[in-house]
Image (spheres, rainbow, N blue to C red):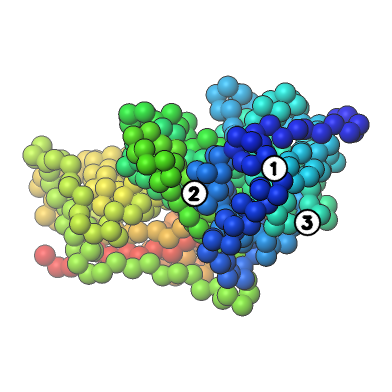
Amino acid sequence: MNRQENIRPARVAGSFYERNAEALRQEIQTRLANAPAYNGTDEILAAAVPHAGYVYSADIAAPVFKALSKATFDTVIVIGHDFGANAPGIIGVLCDFTAFRTPLGDVPVDLELSEALHSADERFVVNNHVHRQEHSIEVQLPFLQTVAKDFKIVPILFGEATPEHCHRLAELLEEHRGNRRILVLSSTDLSHYPTAQTARKLDAQTVTFAQHFDLEGLCRWQSQGPWERELGVETPICSAGGLGTAIVWAQMHGASQCTVLRQGNSGDVSGDDARVVGYASMLFVKKSASGGSAEPEFALATAQQNYLLKLARQTIQDELTGNGTPPEPPQDDALLQPAAVFVTLHKQGRLRGCIGTTAARMPLYKAVAEYAKLAAFEDPRFPAVTVDELSELDIEISVLSPMRKIASADAIVPGKHGVTVRQGFRSGLFLPQVWEQLPDLESFMGYLCAEKAGLPWNAWQSPKTELQVFTVHAFQETAR
């Protein structure tokens, strides 16, 4: 890259935000003052903010920047809009500008780190023209200039949003970080151009992927999600690559929580609910030592459990008789929240089917109905359930907590944690219930690697293997 001074001018000053420096500074300070105070003591590792014109999205973004005023960083990886299928095989588009200019001054680019990324992988390209035309990085800079001092940026426009690309970018940042204190900032809007009602539904799903650190689900959601059936929807998120990299970076450094600070859409400002853009601001944090390490316990009331168990049985019966209709949404917010679920069938104490998902991709009640049907009729280990067997089945439902990455198996609590292992494209999962058959750690992890993931027995001890833990709220039918 060329180190000769080459400053990118402010392109959207006067349209997306104030051109006059004093007016801009005053607007940002006012929006920060009106944002809720952030009193957390946890380490902020990454964040996500929208990038629309300030009149629409600045109040959504302000709580994140208010929180960042208390954070420690000197290098911000600002990841803007991605190009998806228009940039196949490309991880990111870099530039060789020495600084980005705003009305508040120049923000220096960390050319050394940019050059390291470019040299390390040919899937990074340099294109100043693309950066000159794009606004998604620029609009974040006046806020950063207001809340932080003496920082540099690495501006990246994402290429094709895939899990592998997100992992590769995060890994290279870690490899070349040196003594830098890095913050990953994903600049992304959510759903584009549906009605406000549809936007709220789609945005809730997108945010759920972030809250569950579900990178694969997020990328799949952007590229081939069922949102394509919704009228007017162009995309559910315009920078899945940036948000995905934030997820990976945060997990790599021990993040245990994604907190949504604000959500909304352009219709909240314009009053036009017919065609909107969705927004959300989020923080990815690592819990401080003083904050304790207890994992939140998820539980459902007895009435909610009974509803779901009845729904699972009714779904299987309806499939057998051909008389069923899709379940109506229950009048219970807890059952309408996206959840990761496994449904397990036993017959006379022996496993008869078990299928589920580790990602929260649909409301809890829908997930239970869907996986009850799959467990009964699509588990490749067993023939489909018959009408004669229905009365002999016992149904168990397991609702999973979000996955949490761990550094080694030393963090696994036998009897409590479910575990996933992943190495390359191979992965496997055991629910906590498996501890009843495999009570010692070595057997549990060995069978998980060998039988579920197709990995060597001792792969769980390799630093190349990613380990994640989760807890489960499980409940089953009582005597009928």
Q: Earlier in the sequence, mark 1 or mark 3?
A: 1
Q: Is residue 418 visible?
A: no
| Whether residue 373 is situated above or below residue 131 in the rendered picture | below
Question: How many other residues sit within 10 Å of disc 2, few (<14), some (14-19) or many (≥20)?
Answer: many
Instruction: For marks 3 and 2, give the one nearer the viewer.
Output: 3
Question: How many other residues sit within 10 Å of disc 3, few (<14), some (14-19) or many (≥20)?
Answer: few
Quote the CA–CA distance across marks 1 and 3: 20 Å
Q: Nearer the viewer, residue 300 or 31?
A: 31
Instruction: For marks 1 and 2, give the one nearer the viewer.
Output: 1
Quote the CA–CA distance across marks 3 and 2: 25 Å
Of the numbered discs in the image, which one, if any, rests on residue 280? 2
Q: Is residue 193 visible?
A: yes
Residue 332 image point, x, y percent? 23, 59
Q: Earlier in the sequence, mark 1 or mark 2?
A: 1
Residue 283 lies left or right of residue 141; in this view the side is left
Quote the CA–CA distance across marks 1 and 2: 27 Å
Q: Quadrant of the N terminus?
A: top right
Q: Report the residue marked by disc 3.
A: 149
Q: Nearer the viewer, residue 98 or 302?
A: 98
Q: As shown in the figure, which amino acid type bears the numbered disc 1? A: Asn
Instruction: For marks 1 and 3, give the one nearer the viewer.
Output: 1
Q: How many labels, in total?
A: 3
Question: How many other residues sit within 10 Å of disc 1, few (<14), some (14-19) or many (≥20)?
Answer: few
Q: Residue at x 18, y 60 (%)?
A: 307
In the picture, residue 256 is in which quadrant?
bottom right
Q: As shown in the figure, which amino acid type bears the numbered disc 2? A: Ala
Q: Report the residue marked by disc 1.
A: 20
Residue 163 image point, x, y percent? 57, 39
Q: Is disc 1 placed on a helix, strand or loop? A: loop
Q: Earlier in the sequence, mark 3 or mark 2?
A: 3
Of the numbered discs in the image, which one, if any, rests on residue 86? none
